[in-house]
Image (cartoon, helix red, strand yellow):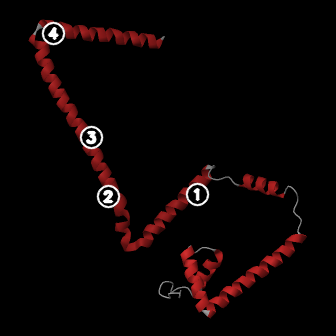
Amino acid sequence: MKFDHKIYENSCQHEVIIAYLDGELKPDEELELEFHFADCKPCADAINAHKKVSNSLEIILEDEMKHIKLPENFSKVVTAKAESNVSGLRQKKEISYAFLICAALVFFLTAGFGSKIDSFWAVPGKFVDQFMAVVIFGAHLVYDAAIAVSVICRSLCHKFIFSSVMSLVVVAGFFFIAFLSLSRLILRQNR
């Protein structure tokens, strides 16, 4: 299987070789790159040089680490110091600094867009417009429904109450009982 240079035309770049050594490539990309290394002597030499340097550093560091003795409670001390020094966003001063930094970033981003600023703010503006249209539609719907119910109730009540004296007495009695029960509840609540 020959390596297709069209598929991986940037394989001779240093960044691709480093990504290969760090294991940051996908398996199929690694396989294609290994076929490329078989055909490309400069890339194969670069890989070998990087591997030699890496192995040399590992050997030197292993030898040096043998002579360094860490205290027994080293990890506990480091953890305790790190936890005591980290305050996060607990203080008001830090929150205000974070807000100012975010505001400055937004300002510089919008200034950096220059002529594209209209399109940058257009998306949130359209969302707000559409959201407000739905809210206003809902408010109008509720308002219109309330008006319709009140007109229907007024028509029915006008016919019901004023058509006979008995219905007027029933409605007045209902309101009187409701008033008494409400006042009784209020008195109980105040005790």
Task: Check disc 1 and report the residue beneath it.
Answer: 97
- Which residue type does callout 4 highlight? Ser
The tag earlier along the polypeptide, 1 or 4, is 1
Name the residue at 19% across, 28% down: 149
For residue 126, which numbered disc appears in the image? 2
Name which quarter of the figure residue 34 lies in. bottom right
Vertical placement of residue 141 versus 89, above or below: above
Q: Residue furthest front?
A: 1
Task: Judge left or right: residue 27 versus residue 71.
Answer: left
Task: Check disc 4 and report the residue beneath it.
Answer: 167
- Is disc 4 placed on a helix, strand or loop? helix
Q: Position of residue 12 (x, y in %)?
A: 57, 88
Structural distance between the alpha carbons of marks 1 and 4: 70 Å
Task: Check disc 3 and report the residue beneath it.
Answer: 139
Q: Position of residue 169 (x, y in %)?
A: 18, 6
Structural distance between the alpha carbons of marks 3 and 1: 40 Å
